[in-house]
Image (tube, coloured by chain):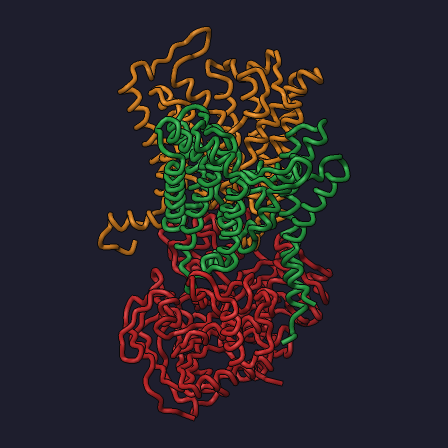
Chain colours: A orange, B green, C red
Amino acid sequence: MNQSGLPWRRGMRSLVWPVAALALLLAFNAATMPGFFAIEARDGRVYGVLVDILNHGSRTALVALGMTLVIATGGVDLSVGAVAAMAGAVTATLLVQAQVPWPVAIAGAVALGMCCGVWNGVCVSVFRLQPIVATLVLMVAGRGVAQLITGGSIITFESGPIAAIGNGSFLGLPVPVTMMVVAAVALQVLVRRTALGLCVQCVGDNATAARLAGVPDRAVMLFVYGVCGVLAATAGIIECSYIKAADANNAGSLLELDAILAVVIGGTSLTGGRFSFAGTIIGAMLMQTMTKTLYMHDVSAEIAPAPKALVVILVCLLHAPRVREWVSGLWRPRGGSA
Amino acid sequence: MKLHRLVSATPVLATCALLVGLFAFGAISYPNFASAAVVRNLLVDNAFLVVAAVGMTFVIISGGIDLSVGAAMAFSATLAAALIEAGGVHPLAAAAVVLAAGLAFGLVQGVLIAVLDVPPFMVTLAGMFLARGAAFAVHPQSRGITHPFVATTLNETLAMHLPLGARGVTIPPTVVVMLLVLIGAWVLLRHARFGRAVYAVGDDACAARLMGLAVRRVKVGVYTLCGLTSAVAGLLFALYQQSGDPASCKGMELDVIAAVIIGGTLLRGGAGSVIGTFAGVMILGLIQTIISFQGDLSSWWTRIVAGGLVLVFLLLHQGIGVVARRVGRTADRQG
Amino acid sequence: MTREGGLLLEAEGLAVRFGSVRALDGVSLTVRAGEVQALLGENGAGKSTLIKCLSGVVRPTGGRMVLCGRRIEPRSPHEAERIGIATVFQEVGLIPRLSVAENICLGREPGRRWLRGLVDWRAVRSRARAAMDRLGLGGLDVDRELGTCSVAVQQMVAIARALDVRARVLILDEPTSSLDRDECARLLGVIGHLRAQEMGIVFISHFLDQVEAIADRVTVLRDGKLVGSFEAAGLTRAKLVSLMVGREFEMPTGKRETTGERGAGSLLSLRAFGRSGMIEGVDADVGAGEVVGLAGLLGSGRSETARLVFGAETATRGTMTFGGEASRFTTPRQAIARGIGMLPENRKEQGIFPSLSVVENLVVSLRAKDGAFSRLAFGSQVALAEEFVRQLGIKTADVHAKISELSGGNQQKVLLARWFAMRPVLLILDEPTRGIDVAAKADVLRAVDRLRGEGTAVLFISSELEEVTRVCGRVVVLRDRRSVAHLEGSDITEASVLAAVARTA
């Protein structure tokens, strides 16, 4: 049998494992925890454990969407956590110290995110630095800049509209969930309806060939890192609106790791090429469900990363070509020429 | 005229020039800066960082990266503190256990990377989560180390008193360990077969394999070594802080990587030195010292300056690569 | 000159398959002590695969190898070296940032007496000097960083490294392709010297004069099969070429006389065109509806010229006029925007997107040309792909199959279709038939001919002289990175091209 099929069908196939893992985890929770699936509506808004997972998972998922594009080009963006911290700092500082109206504060933060992303893109595509290193620069310096903006203190603010981002609801669902859905649909349409998605995959699959085939590689790089920066800034705004404060020191910490893990669990290869937004969102939700499950089984927030790490290693091993060969060798002992 | 040699040595020369320049700047700008005490503090405050950076230098020269260093240090410090204080184990035995744990941790990472072909940054990212979680599992809070052997024997009896400056200078054993690690690493990298193989693997793993080097074994060795130095660094950190804190050393891997890059090690692999790494750590330390002498600058400037320096050195490498190739081509035809 | 030395290496019926491609099909080879054996064949004939088997890089799927009476199965170059087969690969497999001395001794450095793990630098240096002395390069500073040496010196170092182990069989894969004439002569001298030391040498080269000068025996491969093994003494150059090229398959031919106008209204014209350190200067003209060949040996600058025209590298000297305008492209995108396409030399590394489907591989340039935000309905992409699959006879389950699941010839046809879909004004084909089977070759050449008939100008690069003479209406011969001869119409014969290529003026 050949392994081809229509693109969407192949996309479905790559989602099987993450979806199965998520379903398994949910089933485990349903069995061990009564009321896990309980959802109640109050004041035109739904509450429940699942809603909670969606709400907190969507912040990671937003960043992971941008990270998906970056990873699909064969790169990685380590600076998203620092960018989120900077965005939160800018929002709070503009609101409190500059006394600007809230849309301006948000616009300022998003613009900063875009600048950071484009800067990363320039480092990668024009200076030809390795993505890990290029974004490392901003990762190191960015948190310092965030602290510089806030003056090292935690800035609290009282802005109804901005607080509503993290704590309000839209059509019954928490606002971050709505933002994630809007971002995912917009990106999906943009990437799949235009040549952009193809260009991103080509650059990630074979950069030399992409250049020789006339793919505008630099523009593609600037775009994906720019999008990643904007989404990281959005996540930063959401985070500071949860707590109505900007904490330059802790905001967005480990965000880059969660985002990368969500992408990898979602089936996008770290070496670039094919990518799937749906897989990434499922990956982010899987991570969040796992975190929640651990918390509900009285595992402390500090220890929780350890079991997550084991899962990640497992997923990476399943992706590793050597292990795959070995596994497929087990299944097809006689080795036909497929 | 050995122009090509000069060009390839430029990063290390630039690092050393920067170190000297920074120190000179501090000495001119602030009274009391050029003193034995400042130098002593620079060494004492950064000893654990140097040791961790030495391991990272090996990894980066081999063309890899290790993001688990900070978490591994926190784990080692916490484990040591828990063993000594809660477990009643003698500090030396505890140190041995910690070193073995670090070695095993690095070995597993190395096997995953080199034998199973999982990307290094993914493996060590997971390793970072794992080590951090394990640290909290060992002991959930910071735990002071009050064992008499540590408090008196190590920190006082074994400390060296040098008659420098007005009141003399006390060098704790952490600095001695750091120097020993530095010398050992230098010998290993410059003069041992293993070290030369690390350079070869980092420069061109394919060619190295064709030349008959055991590339996978070298890679496993490099990550194992980095696990070991992380454990040593964690022990030094525990000694320095007189405690083991599972929440400590967050983001330390970034400082370490920054120091290695500023020290002139090429992130693509194949070039670098522990001497440069030492200078890199000292540069970061000097910036911190200058900021504290200045008084009106906040500590976060350290990170901003560090980020900027990393960028400058990366671009310097990139430029040197281009120049070196030109010089090589034109300066040939001599036989 | 023939010598009757003892039998050193005997390979029998070696076979290697890469997927569905038979890279090597029942090839036998014998190497005697004190004999230089030349291994000849066009690109894709299986020479590289054969030596990869001998040196343990590739494990043969069939056949056996015997070294000095003992059956061997080397699993790595290291193991092959240990049992006495040393190989110098074409792409110099050395470490540029280590010193010359270290490169010679790496992996087997003499250790210090009291601690074997530490390197005895003095011994390393003296061993390296001794090895270089044997090549007559005793004057070289062995402490020098290898990457700063010229390619020629690096090649010598690679050989010195191979000599350092006491090898009984030395395999040299195109050692002379990047050497100048003096260095070549010195290398041939070294080979003769080693022959006198009763070593068995396998020597791969495209330079027939060197083969004539040094070889005792010539083995010819074609399409993965052994053509034969001959005493060099009785072999003429013409016989060699005919053995290498083979005649049993009739290629479809474009008419040699061009239908398009030429000269006056040429579409592309190059004058002293080049880039320092890469191409000295090339003169060439290509008119619409004309196929112009770029002939020359490997390393003569054929592919480099193509890359300069296409903007993959930026030219720094001379002029290029395209469509009546002086042009100098700095990126392939600019060239593509003007209607130029290029089928790159290395299909796997420069051409295909292995994890993408046939249709995606096919439409990428068309879509990228209109910009990243352009739209093209999925249905029309598929229709386009299916049209070309039919037209070029691409064998694939359907257009959504991964391109890496196709055979090499079909992958190449997809890449051709990528450019055909653009309706290019000028198409540059760099080794379009390399490494694909004979039937696919014929298909590709037929497609090129059809394109020419539609008025596209074609710049055609091939190592197979036979193809060049059949397809091209004009041939520019390159040697030593510059154009040295222009042939036209009935002047183009294998003999005339070969004469221009091989002339050692």
> Measuring 70% from the left and 64% from the top, which residue is drawn there?
C320
Q: Is residue C289 among what the camera can see?
A: no
Which residue reaches farthest left? A334
* Outermost top residue: A43
Please tell me in which quadrant of the rendered image residue A104 appears: top right
**Count of all numbered marks drawn on residues in the image:** 0
Does residue B323 appear left or right of residue B227 in this picture? right
Residue A55, above or below B8: above
Q: Residue at x 71, y 37 (%)?
A: B33
Residue C9, how many percent across, how many down? 33, 79
Report x, y in % for residue A282.
Answer: 41, 30
Residue A281: percent from left, percent from top: 44, 30
Q: Is residue A81 visible?
A: yes
Please tell me which residue lies in front, B78 or A189.
B78
In this rendering, is residue A234 above or below C441? above
Q: Is residue C322 above or below residue C15?
A: above
Q: Is residue A69 left or right of residue C482?
A: left
Asked which quadrant contains residue A289, the reply is top left
Q: Nearer the viewer, residue C492 or C332?
A: C332
Residue C217 is left or right of residue A113, and the answer is left
Residue appearing at x 44%, y 30% in the figure = B148
**Residue that sits furthest to the right in the current view:** B28
Name the residue nearer the viewer: A92 or A114.
Answer: A92
Q: Residue at x 43, y 25 (%)?
A: A302
Percent of width and height locating residue C275: 67, 65
Horizontal side of residue A57 vs C4, given as left or right = right
Task: Choose between C304 and B23: the one closer to the eye.
Answer: B23
| Relative height, residue C13 to residue A136 (above, below) | below
